[in-house]
Image: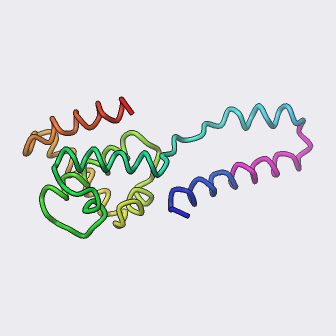
Amino acid sequence: MTNLQKISRSRQSARSSILRELSKDKWSPSLISMIVSKVEEPKTYKTYEIDYLTSVAADLFEINKHLMVSKSRLREVVMARNICMLYLRNYTHLSYKTIGEVFDKNHTTVIYSCKRCMMDIEINYAGLKDKYNILLEKMEEA
């Protein structure tokens, strides 16, 4: 079971426990279902979507996709990894901790990586702004 599957299951169990608690107070089933339906499910990313994201980033930076989860500190690998972390933080409801688990990094590393990547995009360091825009376009197409 992957980390993302564990997170999805924990959200499902939280929703189930909310339903149990509401039913104890003798609320009508229609009211309970209305309340639960109003609670938004956060957008979760499946493993294959993260695989696609890392594949796109690896192609943009011309590196092997498997280097994204390695301890490599080569500039291209770090920039590709950072751009993926920034994308996941900005376009999903994944926490820093969860993103760190995907890339086998600490949550503080993810925070630093996202801040650093935003600064690099702002000054267009090594054409990062263009690559990030290409990544956004390809992810929208998928």
Q: State the scheme by which the image is colored.
A: rainbow
Q: Is residue 4 above or below residue 126?
A: below
Q: Where in the figure is residue 41, as x and y percent of width and height? A: 60, 40
Q: Which of the pair 28/72 is nearer the observer?
A: 72
From the image, which quarter does the C terminus lie in? top left
Q: Which of the pair 31/77 is nearer the observer?
A: 77
Residue that lies at the very extreme toward the right in this rendered image: 26
From the image, which quarter does the N terminus lie in? bottom right
**Total number of numbered discs in the rendering:** 0
Q: Is residue 10 left or right of residue 119?
A: right
Q: Identify the magenta region.
A: 14-27
Q: Where in the figure is residue 46, as x and y percent of width and height? A: 49, 48
Residue that lies at the very extreme toward the left in this rendered image: 126
Q: Is residue 138 above or below residue 125?
A: above
Q: Residue at x 22, y 33 (%)?
A: 133
Q: Where in the figure is residue 92, as x and y percent of width and height? A: 43, 42
Q: Would you identify the image quadrant in which residue 122 lies?
A: top left
Q: Residue at x 25, y 53 (%)?
A: 82
Q: Is residue 20 magenta?
A: yes
- Main SS of residues in magenta: helix
Q: Residue at x 81, y 37 (%)?
A: 32
Q: Would you identify the image quadrant in which residue 42 lies?
A: top right
Q: Residue at x 25, y 62 (%)?
A: 67
Q: Which of the pair 24/99 is nearer the observer?
A: 99
Q: Where in the figure is residue 89, as x and y percent of width and height? A: 37, 46
Q: Is residue 58 magenta?
A: no
